[in-house]
Image (cartoon, helix red, strand yellow):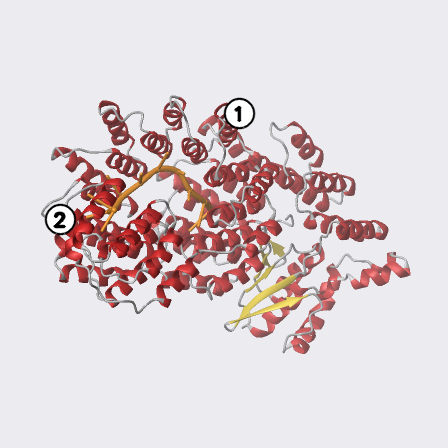
DNA sequence: TTAGGGTTAG
């Protein structure tokens, strides 16, 4: 359609010059509000008297009828066939038709063509053209049109001014709207409504409400649009009291059954956190429509009542014959994400396709989010790839889906692709990608992304600030985390405290975590469930057994917090650490919550540490039955089998993995040296200084062999070969550490990062290296940081 | 023939 219209615009660019007086026609209707029928009659009457070409009149009428009935193609065909187009009326009808259809570019093109053909725009032309400029989001066009109306003296016309108020608000220039509004000599109801709604769309609910009240104080008569904007202002600012006042006003003024107002009321109460009030409005509506249902579902979702949102739709389909539309699906999908209802999410996707709702930018973005939340990153990616249009939010959703599912490296690649797109990353992009940096990056890279954020002016938001604290801690730069925490005191919240407590925890500095907790209480910050996850992790990693139990028991007693699955996870880690495997298994069986893959993962780690293959097999089986991504647990079990020389079982696991399409992650270790980041894989030969690295490794190998527990001689010859192939002697972590040793000054500490957990043999070896070289060696894996010093590790040999 | 309008993604 758009192409056809554009073609029409340009093919007939040079048409005939004006012969009909525009002023005459303008005079006909200038002050009248007439309906279609009257207009046609009047046109016929007047034109029969004044126009020399009655044929042109009938075309004008037909053209108008076409636009009125929505047949724009027909109107355009008629328009192009007109020999004389000097009457602004026909241009106005066409421009209006295009604007109403959302074809803003074409509408503006016709306006320029009108000028080209020497037809002057009138007070009817400009409101349409200004609306089209607002729709195009082009300040340049809008500004030119504004200059034009000022030049020809139409800047005093109420309709023109009202259109300008709306246009500037849409362009994000609310100050310009304000200026026009203030300078208007005569303001009508639409002027007030446009200004109030402009403030709401600019996110300034306070000014919107002030103007709403001012309008009432001036004795202006308000209408449904004033009310809708007023309620929008209350929703935006969480002004429940004002919302309730407007609700009373609605009832007093007899607007209580207006369907649009009822929708806004449901929405306002939902956004003010009063879903009960939303329900009360909703269930009193007679003749509910799909928009009411959508607003109610939105209110449920916003207030975390996901099951209620699903049953609401079910009831409405059954009792009110409501047919879900695109927005119903968009509102419902977050419930699938939060409840992990992948099956329902897929059904919604299928329904959207069947009903022809796709392609739809928002719907598809919500589907990416749903698939990402339900750990279906492949489906999310497929959705993303197939999208016809993408915006920054869809890119962010895809980056977030990768990060959430542990695909940090792909997320990095996508983030870099995004930098080549015409989008500027926003706070959400940064909070989405920062965990990927946290997962893999080193301090210098962490600082680089922080610098980039500062350049974009994106580090003042509390979400971003907390992500930064986490990222620094996870990059191994605890000082950076602490510095961000101290500097951002104005954006600091409970999440900042929890994050820093967790930051020290993952570095095995549990005692500092505990001191921070005390300071947090002194500052009057009340702990929440996540605080205890951080604290219990701190105790567990640092081996503070007694403290762990004290905190766990105080949660309910002292703070009224019911232990969640994460808290049980920390206690199971702790029981694993002290070797109480039976107790850990017993706790899993007896706890009041359904065990998750993470819980079984804790038991698996404990089983690995205490060489309990039977329990490890059970844990892996449970993880598989939860349909959780299973690569890590299979690899761990496979390694246990290998350590025990059970190669048939290793083969079986490999077969299982292959059957399920799972691939072992290629292990690597990264290190920063003299401004550069180097990455090593096992048995790596690619580094420029690899010969010196292997020489250095040779020198310390003799010492390392003393602590290695891999006794090749106890295997059969065939197994011995395989054992040698899997020997950790040249594992990436050792190569990276040796590179660190030869490229840094004696005494300096060495920091490396791994993408998978350290094997036991390397852990023993690095302890020994720290002793013989008298260096502090810090190794960060996906879970914690190991600080090796003088033959000991901060993890207490449990990770 | 003109202006303002309900529910929509992280």
The image position of residue A680, as x and y in percent, is 64, 67
Give the quarter of the image for residue A725: bottom right
Q: Residue at x 23, y 26 (%)?
A: A249
Q: Which mark sits nearer the N-terminus, 2 or 1? A: 2
Mark carried by residue A318: 1
Q: Is residue A644 visible?
A: no
The image position of residue A430, as x and y in percent, is 44, 56
Give the class, few, some or many, for how many residues have Cα within 10 Å of label 1's Cα (few <14, many ≥20). few
Q: Residue at x 49, y 50 (%)?
A: A503
Q: Residue at x 45, y 55 (%)?
A: A391
The image position of residue A112, as x and y in percent, is 27, 64
Share a chain, discs 2 and 1? yes
Of labels 2 and 1, the one closer to you: 1
Give the class, few, some or many, for how many residues have Cα within 10 Å of label 2's Cα (few <14, many ≥20). few
Q: Secondary structure at mark 1?
A: helix
Q: Which residue is mark 2?
A: A182
As measured in the structure, the alpha-carbon distance from the residue carrying label 2 to the one carrying label 1 is 51 Å
Q: Chain of mark 1?
A: A
* For residue A394, side relative to residue A579 (left or right): left
């Amino acid at each position: 359609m758009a192409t056809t219209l554009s073609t029409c615009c340009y093919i007939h660019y040079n048409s005939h010059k004006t012969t009909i007086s525009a002023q005459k026609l303008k005079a006909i209707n200038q002050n009248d509000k007439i309906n279609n029928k009257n207009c046609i009659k009047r046109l016929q009457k007047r034109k029969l008297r004044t126009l020399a070409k009655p044929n042109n009149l009938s075309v004008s009428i037909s053209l108008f009828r076409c636009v009125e009935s929505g047949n724009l193609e027909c109107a355009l065909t008629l328009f192009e066939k007109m020999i004389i187009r000097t009457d602004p009326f026909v241009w106005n009808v066409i421009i209006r038709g295009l604007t109403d259809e959302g074809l803003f570019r074409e509408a503006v093109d016709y306006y320029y063509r009108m000028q080209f053909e020497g037809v002057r725009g009138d007070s009817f032309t400009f409101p349409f053209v200004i609306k089209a400029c607002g729709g195009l989001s082009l300040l340049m066009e809008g500004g030119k049109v504004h200059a034009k109306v000022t030049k020809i003296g139409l800047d005093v016309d109420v309709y023109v001014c009202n259109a300008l108020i709306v246009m500037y608000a849409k362009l994000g220039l609310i100050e310009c709207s304000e200026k026009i509004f203030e300078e208007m000599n005569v303001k009508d109801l639409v002027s007030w409504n446009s200004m109030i709604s402009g403030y709401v769309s600019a996110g300034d609910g306070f000014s919107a409400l002030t103007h709403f009240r001012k309008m009432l104080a001036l004795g202006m008569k308000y209408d449904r649009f004033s009310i809708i904007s007023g309620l929008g202002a209350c929703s935006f600012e969480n002004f429940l009291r004002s919302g309730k006042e407007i609700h009373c006003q609605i009832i007093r003024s007899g607007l209580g059954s207006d369907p649009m107002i009822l929708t806004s009321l449901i929405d306002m109460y939902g956004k003010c956190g009063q879903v009960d009030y939303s329900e009360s409005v909703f269930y009193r509506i007679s003749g509910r429509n799909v928009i009411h249902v959508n607003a109610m579902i939105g209110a449920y979702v916003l207030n975390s009542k996901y099951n209620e949102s699903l049953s609401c739709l079910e009831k409405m389909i059954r009792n009110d014959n409501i047919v879900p539309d695109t927005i119903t699906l968009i509102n419902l999908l977050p419930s699938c994400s939060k409840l992990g209802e992948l099956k329902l999410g897929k059904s919604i996707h299928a329904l959207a396709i069947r009903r022809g709702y796709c392609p739809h930018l928002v719907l598809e973005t919500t589907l990416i989010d749903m698939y990402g939340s339900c750990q279906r990153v492949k489906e999310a990616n497929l959705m993303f790839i197939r999208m016809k249009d993408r915006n920054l939010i869809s890119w962010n959703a895809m980056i977030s889906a990768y990060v959430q599912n542990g695909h940090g490296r792909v997320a990095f690649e996508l983030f870099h692709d995004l930098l080549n797109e015409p989008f500027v990353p926003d706070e959400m992009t940064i909070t989405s990608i920062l965990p990927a940096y946290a997962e893999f990056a080193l301090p210098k890279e962490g600082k680089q992304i922080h610098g980039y954020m500062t350049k974009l002016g994106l580090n003042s938001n509390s979400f971003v600030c907390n992500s930064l604290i986490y990222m620094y801690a996870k990059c191994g730069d605890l000082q950076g985390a602490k510095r961000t925490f101290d500097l951002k005191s104005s954006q600091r919240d409970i999440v900042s405290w929890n994050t820093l407590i967790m930051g020290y925890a993952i570095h095995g500095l549990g005692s500092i975590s505990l001191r921070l907790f005390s300071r947090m209480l002194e500052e009057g910050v009340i702990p929440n469930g996540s605080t205890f996850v951080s604290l219990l992790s701190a105790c567990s990693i640092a081996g503070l057994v007694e403290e762990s139990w004290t905190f766990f028991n105080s949660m309910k007693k002292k703070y009224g917090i019911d232990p969640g699955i994460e808290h049980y996870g920390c206690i199971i880690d702790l029981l694993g650490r002290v070797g109480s495997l039976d107790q850990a298994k017993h706790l899993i069986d007896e706890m009041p919550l359904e065990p998750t893959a993470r819980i079984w993962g804790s038991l698996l780690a404990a089983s690995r540490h205490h060489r309990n293959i039977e329990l490890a097999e059970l844990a892996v089986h449970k993880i598989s039955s939860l349909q959780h991504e299973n690569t890590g647990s299979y690899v761990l079990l496979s390694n246990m089998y290998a350590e025990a020389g059970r190669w048939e079982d290793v083969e079986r696991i490999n077969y299982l993995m292959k059957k399920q399409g799972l691939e072992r992650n290629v292990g690597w270790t990264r290190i920063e040296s003299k401004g550069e980041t180097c990455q090593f894989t096992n048995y790596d030969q690619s580094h420029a200084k690899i010969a010196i690295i292997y020489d250095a490794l040779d020198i310390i190998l003799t010492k390392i062999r003393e602590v290695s527990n891999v006794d090749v001689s106890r295997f059969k010859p065939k197994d011995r070969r395989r054992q040698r192939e899997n020997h950790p002697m040249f594992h990436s972590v050792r190569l990276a550490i040796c590179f660190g040793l030869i490229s840094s000054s004696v005494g300096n500490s060495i920091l490396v990062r791994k993408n998978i957990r350290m094997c036991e043999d390397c852990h023993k070896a690095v302890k020994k290296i720290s002793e013989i070289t008298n260096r502090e060696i810090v190794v960060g894996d996906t879970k914690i940081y190991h600080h090796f010093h003088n033959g000991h590790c901060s993890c207490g040999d449990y990770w």
